[in-house]
Amino acid sequence: MGRKSVIPLLAIAAWSGTGKTTLLKALIPALCAKGVRPGLIKHTHHDMDIDKPGKDSYELRKAGAAQTLVASTQRWALMTETPEEPELDLHYLVSRMDASTLDLVLVEGFKHEAVPKIVLFRHGCGHEAHELVLDEHVIAVASDIPLVLDVPNLDINGIAQIVALIMRWLEQQKLNGER
């Protein structure tokens, strides 16, 4: 019986306004250039909708479909209504992704999940460095100022440096998975 492929998860965690999306917009193409196929799960606290009122798919979904899959020749998206779900389950969401097309799933947010993460810190964004939560899941901190930490302190603007750390971490995940 075949073993289900497990996609390594790496969260990019920080307070709002620190630059998670900005970093990911630079990190994703840099990882792709290294041959890594990243997926992304973005957590939002907002009531988001990828569909638009007036579109057939929106109207059909609002009519009561529990799941709606919209497809074109360029992409497809599955929308699942979750009004009874108390919290998002990160591992369930990852299980919806196609492991055969991904080497890594980057997670924006979910900072309280027990998954490996790079924590971001930016001086002057309303928080102090001593407020950082550095639990056993933090593999590095990317910051715009030098910090004295027990984990690597990377330059938040040094994409090559962050990619190098992720590549080493991914290699370690592969080695751990082969045991």
Image (tube, rainbow, N blue to C red):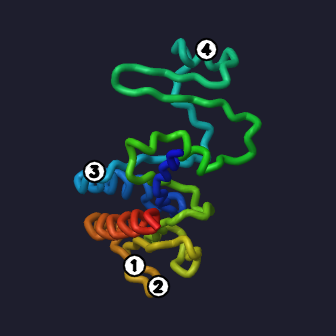
Helix, strand or loop for disc 1: strand
Contact? badges 2 and 4 (CB < 8 Å) = no
Q: CA distance from mark 3 to mark 4?
A: 36 Å
Q: CA distance from mark 2 to mark 1?
A: 7 Å
**Residue pictured at 54% horizontal, 39% vertical:** 96
Residue nearest the observer in this picture, 45 or 65 = 65
Classify residue 49 by image quadrant. Answer: top right
In percent of width and height, residue 154 lies at 36, 75
Q: Is residue 134 left or right of residue 102?
A: right
Q: Residues within 10 Å of mark 2 (few under 14, many from 20)?
A: few
Q: Which residue is mark 4?
A: 60
Contact? badges 2 and 1 (CB < 8 Å) = yes
Q: Which residue is mark 1?
A: 153
Residue 149: image tag: 2
Q: CA distance from mark 3 to mark 1?
A: 23 Å
Q: Amino acid at mark 1?
A: Asn
Q: Which residue is mark 3?
A: 32
In percent of width and height, residue 19 lies at 42, 59
Helix, strand or loop for disc 4: helix
Q: Amino acid at mark 4?
A: Leu
Residue 53 position (above or below residue 77): above
Residue 112 position (above or below residue 61): below
**Residue pictured at 47% horizontal, 52% vertical:** 7
Sequence-first disc among 4 and 1: 4
**Residue pictured at 45% horizontal, 47% vertical:** 40
Q: Amino acid at mark 3?
A: Cys
